[in-house]
Structure formats: C-alpha cells, structure tokens
Amino acid sequence: MENDPVFQWTKMILDHLWLLVPLILLVYIICRPSVLRYISRVKFGDFELELASLKEELKETKQQLVESHSQVRDLIAKLDTNAPWKELRRAARPLKAQAGYLAGDSLTEALSGLEPGATPAALHAAAVIARKRSDPAVLGQLVACLDRLSAADDLQGVRLNTVWQLASAVHLTLVGIYKNGTTPIPDLSLLERARSVIERLIGHPRVIEDQPNDSKKGIQGPAAKALRWIGTALAAPPSEPQP
C-alpha cells in the first residue's frame, strides 16, 4: 500500500491538513467579521487564536487614547505659564506622561500649539510634548516656531522655559534621527533653515541673558547641541550622516 499513489497523496494531505485549517478559519473570519462576537478562543494543534483578549486590548487602547486626549486638554487649561519655574517643571510631568499615548487628531491638536496664534499655555504644552516624543515628523514645526520667536525682539513675550523646551526638542529630535536612526530624515533645506534659525536664536539678546553665569544651563545649551548635530548632518554624505 505504501507504493500506492492514492495512498501517498491521501497521507500527505492528512499530514498537512492542520496547516490549512487555521488559514481557512482566518479567511472565513475575514469574510464574516460578525462571527467575532461569538468567538473567544480558537485552538487547533499548536495554533491558538485568542480573539476576546485581542478585542479587550484594542478596547483598552482606544479608551487610553480618549482619556489622554481629555487629560492633555485639562492640563493645558490649567497651565499657568507665568508660574515660577519649579511649578512649570511640575506641570510638565503629567504632560510628558501622556505624550506617548497621543495619536491622530489628539496629537495634531496638542501640537497645534506650535502654530501661530496659539496661547502661551498651548505653546508650552506642545513644546513639552514634542520634546518628550522627539518625533522627526515634527521637526519642521519646531523650526518654524523657533523661527517666528527668534525673529521678534522680545521672543513674542514667550517664557524662556518654553523656548528652552523648544530648543531641547530640536536637539533630542536630531539625536533620535542621526544617532538612533529614527525617520523621516530631514531634507537639506530644512537642515539649512534649522541652522539659520538656531544661530539667530543663540545670538538673541534675551537668550544671551538666560543663565548668564552658566549659559549651558540656559537656552544656549540645547541650542548649541542642536547646532552641532545640524552641522554634522550637513557635512556628512546625504544618505549616511554621522554623529
């Protein structure tokens, strides 16, 4: 019988049937998503599908996003940018804690504080969140914001700690790109604009007066670090910037 072709084909199909069942099951679920409400776990051999757990995790993630959005709004509403520096530092902690949970429209709304016309509180919160996330996709917004501020004699009246947060956000974002390999990589035009803006920022009278006894502790500290990364990136081959 072992030499019988029919027997051999039948044996091969039965031996591999367990591989086909999960695939068939997944195709069926995709075609009939309504069955998900009736399934909590499917197990066949070593293959196990826990849909109830997955659905619960997705529900919890969605709830966390909603709560983070609401909390960030409340934190911005309560934020007093005229408060002493230590109070600003305390106020930044919950913003940083929620920064990683923001996504989609809630993240866009939080970062809208970097745009013209934003309130001082919204700008400060956006700077804190951008610094915590260090997202390369936000680098252009950060540079544009610092461009506006550094072009004004009084930095548009913005608190120095807010400007420090912005400069540090640029620095940490550049570190993420050129040291840790995060993407997208900024194009040369953005890097050149960033260099011009940071140079102007470092030379701004209000920035020079920030921590005059130890400029590294003031805005000039992260700004100078950002400027070094920009210079290195511009000097390196386009595809392989080196720190």
Image (spheres, helix red, strand yellow):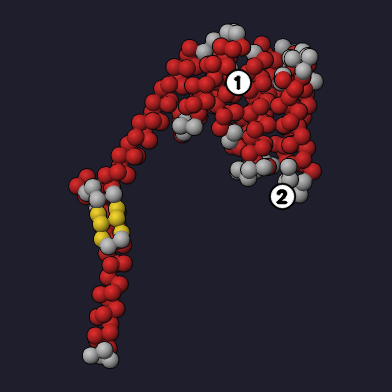
Question: Could you tell me residue 1's position as x and y percent?
Answer: 23, 90
Question: Could you tell me residue 38's position as x and y percent?
Answer: 19, 47
From what the image shows, is residue 57 above or below residue 239?
above
Q: Which residue is mark 1?
A: 116
Toward the left, the furthest residue is 38
User: Who is closer to the viewer here, 108 or 167?
Assistant: 167
Mark 2–mark 1 Cα distance, whole angstroms, equals 34 Å
The amino acid beneath tag 2 is: Glu
Label count reads: 2
Determine which quarter of the picture holds residue 124. top right
Q: Are marks 2 and 1 in contact (CB under 8 Å)?
A: no
Q: Is residue 15 left or right of residue 103?
A: left
**Badge 1 density bin: few <14, some 14–19, many ≥20, Cα 10 Å:** few
Question: Could you tell me residue 121's position as x and y percent?
Answer: 55, 15
Residue at 32% over, 44% down: 54
Residue at 27% over, 44% down: 52
From what the image shows, is residue 150 above or below residue 33?
above
> Does dot 1 land on a helix, a strand or a loop?
loop
Looking at the rendered structure, which numbered label has been put on residue 102?
none
The amino acid beneath tag 1 is: Pro
Looking at the rendered structure, which numbered label has been put on residue 240?
2
